[in-house]
Every structure is written in structure tokens, then in C-alpha cells.
Image (cartoon, rainbow, N blue to C red):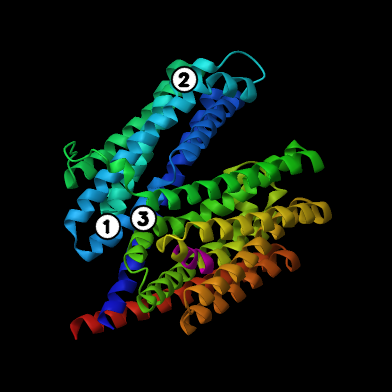
Amino acid sequence: MNNQNEDYGHVLKFTGIFGGVQGLNVLVGLVRNKFVALLLGPDGMGLVSLFNTTVQLISQATHLGISVSAVRNISEYYDAGDTEKVAHCVKVVRGWCLLTALLGMLVCVVAGPFLSNTTFSWGDHTLHFVLLAPAVGMIAITGGETAILKGQRKLGALALVQIVAALASLVIAIPIYYFFWQAGIVPVIVLMAFVTMCATLRFSLRIFPLQIRGARGILGEGMGMIRLGVAFTLAGIVGSGAEMFIRSFLNVAGSLDAVGLYNAGYMITITYAGLVFAAMESDYFPRLSAVNQDVEATNLMVNKQTEVSVLAIAPLLTSLIIFLPVLIPLLLSSQFLPIVAMTQVAALAMFFKAMTLPVAYITLARGLSVTYFVLESVYYVALVALIMVGYRHWGIWGTGLAITLAHLVEFLIINGYARWRYQYKQSSTVVKYFAVHLLIGLSAYILTMTVDELAYWLLGALLIVVSLSFSLWVLNQKRKSSSTSNRL
């Protein structure tokens, strides 16, 4: 019981820490984007988006998903206390990351003319893509070193790296854009990648100094890591392809405005939920990987993570549903008011996401690459199909409904598969907390369609208070239980 409560306290602690860091990132991002919009204008922001998207695409296609798959191997050896295998695994990870960094840079340089012709309808931007190659390489190195920190549970270091990167984005971007305008876009991207890499290396090299001796032949190892990483990469490509298809469909079936509205509503929902889900990859995944073959320990850890996720995110989602009519003009502009209804119904999807994501990590923790790829692909196929139907029948609101229904499908498939394949069973407390908060969330959504003016705000505030009070009451009971067990 003592270990269980300590585990619960750990989940709660680091969910709060990484949620706070994510909140800082969001805040800094809002400030940065505001300045970028003022300094560069719409055209400049478009260039920033195009170059960043290109760097992300090349990185995703060439880095083999090592930043995720390597965590599993390092975590297993770390929890077993096998320092020799951990050190050797670090060498393997660094060797593969160096190779993928060189591969990514080469692809960026060679594909420069093609990227210029396909991305832009004016001018020759080949040199810009060539100059972005170092950023692709540094992102690969950063990904490997981040995996080492995650596997070693250096969560404080990971949080500090994210804070440094967020603050550096302000310090670097604003002066350069002010003095060099659009000519500073590529240097900013490269410098940001350099700062993030240096901050990550500062911590990882203190734990495992760079060793060249004994590195010969290491590229012949770690194929299990590479297979899982490739599956992760392919799933990411399927996801990116699905998102591109959705936006193309909305552009053809609707208009460019529909694409912009959908994108804004989708990003608000995902960004808001990210405040709670931020700790999953950094803290939860390494711990789950270490016990991936122990059914009882896996069930306990997944249920604890799910409890905290549901209790933490539900009050935020209820607040989002109620306050969206105020938040949209504040964060964007009154032109985006049509996405209020879409985002309110899409917010319900995150209730199911809180119940699904911790379970979905079991497949990654066990290294079942093909299974992970298939499950992810099924979700994206469902998302595309539902959005096509939803938009044709109900317009932009239908896309929000489709997002929620797709997450419901994912919830049923992931949890059903985990119960059959991994003997995972949801605890009664998880089901109870989810049922209570989903009922409150649905009540908040129904309120948006049935009540206006003062009654809306009064009843909405009441639902927020009820949701928050319930979560705080449960969390307080868990803390008391933990304190009692520790004293015993």
C-alpha cells in the first residue's frame, strides 16, 4: 500500500510539474507569436510555418523515432540496476542518432531544390532549405540525449531544458526579427535547435560522458529499438498524411476559411489538453517500460496514471467548454467565433483521451511495433472518415463532433485490445471518476445549447466549481492516505 500511494504521489507531482512547464511554454508561445505577427506580418508568419513544418517533416522521416523507442531499452536496464548495459545502450543510441543526424542533413540538402519548387510558387529558396540542414541534425542529437534523460528519470533536467528552450525562443527570436525581419527566420530556427541541443547535452553528458572507445560495431545492435522507432515514425507519417488529407478535403469541400477555422479549433483543444498530458512521455512512459512484462505492476501504474489524468484534466475541460465564447476573441479574434461550437464539442474528446493515452503506452512499452502502427492507423482512418461525414452534414461543427467520435472509437479499440492482449483491467475507481466527470462535462456542453445570458454563466460557474471540488476532494483523500501509509 505504501508503494502504491508513493506511486500515486509521484504521478501527481510530475503531472503538475510538466503541466506547469507546458503552461509556461503556451504562455511564452502566445507572447512570441504576438511579437512575430507584429514584426513579420502574415507573410512572415507563413514563412516561419513553412520552414518549421519542413524541418519537422524531414526530422520525422529520417530520425527513425529513436527519441521514443530508446527510452524503453534504457528504462528496463536502469530499473534492473544494470549500469553496464545502460552505458552500452547509451553508446548505441548515440551512434544511431549521429547516423540519423547525418542522414537528415543530407536529405535536407539534396532535397533543397525539390522542396523549394513544391513549397513556394515564387523565387528560389533552395539555399534556405540547405541552411536549415544543421537544425535537422541537431534535432536528431537532441532527441537521443532526451531519451537518455528520460530513461534515467532525470525529470528535473527535462523540465529545465523545456524552460530554457521556451525562454530562449523569446530572447533569440524577437531581436533577430526586429533587426533582420524575414531574413532572420532561418537563423532563428537553427539557433533555437542549437540552444535546445546544448541545454540537453549539458545534463546528459554529466551523467554519461561521451566515449568513443568501444563504439565500433554498435550500429549493428539496437535493431529492436530501430523497429519500434520505425513503427513510431510510420505512424507519425500516417497521422501527418491524415491531417493533410483532412485539410485538403475541407479546402475542396468548403473553403480556405474552413481549413483555418478547423486548424484553430483543433489546436486550441489539443494545446489545452497538453497541459495535463505533458508528463506522459517524460515520466510515465519510462516507468511503464521498466515493468512492461509485469501484468499486475502494469495495471496498477496505468490505473494510477489514468486516475490523475482524468481528475486533472476534467475541471480544465469543463472550464474550456464554458469560457470558449470569451477565450476565442481574446486568444484569436472575433473572426474565429464560428469555431466556438466546434471546439466545445471537440473538448469532450479529451475526456476519452485521458482514459485512452495511458493504456495506449502499454503497446509502446512492450515494443510491439506492428501492433502500435496498426492501432494508430485505425484511429486516423476513423478520424478522416468521420470528419468527411461530419463536415458534409453539419459544417465546421461536424468536424468537432467527428473528433469526439473518433476518440470514442479509439477508446473502445485501445481498451478492448489491452484487456484481451495484455490482461489490462480498469479499476473501479477509474471508472467512477471518469463517469462523474464525463457527466459534468456533458452537462456543461448541454448548457451551451440550451441556456443564455446570466443563467448560462451562473450554471456554468456552478459546474466548474463542482468539477474542481470533486477532483480536489479526491486528490486530498489520496494525499491523506499516502501520508498515513508513510507514517506506518
Tell me the CA gap for discs 1 and 2.
36 Å
Please report whichever mark, 1 or 2, sits nearer to the chain's N-terminal start: 2
Instruction: Name the residue type under label 3.
Output: Ser
Query: For the view shown, which residue lies furthest in the top direction?
Result: 123
Query: For the view shown, which residue lies furthest in the right direction?
Result: 393
Disc 1: which residue: 153
Where residue 113 sits: x, y (%)?
56, 18
Between 113 and 26, the residue placed more toward the observer is 113
Dot 2, how many residues are within 10 Å of its Cα: few (below 14), some (14-19), or many (20+)? some
What residue do we see at 35% from left, 51% from top?
70
Please report whichever mark, 2 or 3, sits nearer to the chain's N-terminal start: 2
Asked which secondary structure carries label 1, the reply is: loop
Where residue 230 sits: x, y (%)?
47, 47
Disc 2: which residue: 130
Mark 1 vs mark 2: give the one in front. 2
Between 481 and 240, the residue placed more toward the observer is 240
284 to the left or right of 336: left
Quadrant of the image containing the N terminus? bottom left
Does residue 74 lie above or below 189 as drawn? below
Disc 3: which residue: 282
Magenta-drawn stretch contains 360: yes
Instruction: Name the residue type under label 1.
Output: Arg
Instruction: Name the residue type under label 2.
Output: Val
Quadrant of the image containing the C terminus? bottom left
Does residue 247 lie above or below 312 as drawn? above
Between 173 and 147, the residue placed more toward the observer is 147
Q: Which residues are magenta?
A: 355-361
Please indicate, yes or no, whether residue 168 appears anywhere in the rendered image: no
